[in-house]
Amino acid sequence: MKKSKGPTDFTSIPGGRGKEEQTTAPPGSSKVIDLTSIRAKRNQESRRGVERFFMQTMIDAYCELEDDKVQLPIEIVEVSESGCSFRVSSEKSQALPKGKDGGYLPLPVRLYFSRDSFLRVNFDVINVTTDIAGGGQKLRFGCRLDTAFASSEVYCQFVRFVQTFAQHCGRDTKQFAAY
């Protein structure tokens, strides 16, 4: 068995990670580095980035207030088949409906796919955390999908589409001229 001469520098490998993310084995050790898990983590981060970009640029999301007469814009951060998380400013979050116990009531959310077509789904608030984003204080809501609504299945199919799109999409490098 060959002895290791020192730490492996992944920055010299094409497509390798930067020094701050490299995984090395101590000199003289026989530890095997699992590049598959490193690659899987990087792919997952990339997919999540595409999902966030898709949700923030292609879909407008609003929480219904006051019997569908007022809508509060929300920023969807993460989506999954079981729910989502979204951000809203601390100030605007005061408008979200609360029960007598101070907890949030189920939130009816509209996901707009065009100016006048939307999917309405209900979410139950599971947790709320402070999220400093974009220079201002915001709250991040973690929500579970209310599966009692018929639209919940459509939401799940949409999330599967977004996740599959993120796995298989390509990035246009603008190397081709338009015909």
Image (spheres, rainbow, N blue to C red):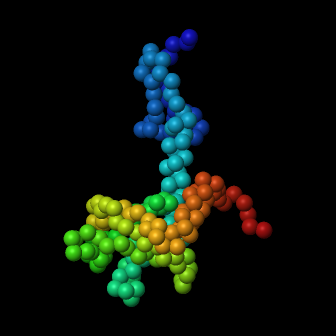
The answer to whether residue 27 is above or below residue 39 is above
Q: Position of residue 49 (x, y in %)?
A: 50, 56
Residue plotted at (54% across, 85% down): 116
**On screen, 102 above or below 42?**
below
- Residue 51 at x, y = what percent? 52, 60
* Residue 81 as seen in the image, left or right of residue 130: right
Q: Is residue 125 left or right of residue 18?
A: left
Question: Image point 39% across, 80% down: which residue?
Answer: 64
Q: Is residue 67 left or right of residue 39?
A: left
Q: Tell me which residue sits at (46%, 32%) in the image.
A: 23
Residue ranking furthest to the right: 179
Res 56 visible: no
Residue 97 locus on image (x, y percent): 30, 77
- Quarter of the C terminus within the rendering: bottom right
The x and y percentages for residue 9 are 50, 29
Residue nearer the viewer, 47 or 160: 160
Q: Quadrant of residue 90?
A: bottom left
Q: Nearer the viewer, residue 82 or 64?
A: 82
Outermost residue toward the front in this view? 148
Seen from this angle, which residue lies furthest bottom? 69
Left or right, residue 145 beside residue 179 = left
Query: In the rendered image, which quarter is residue 136 located in?
Result: bottom left
**Callout count:** 0
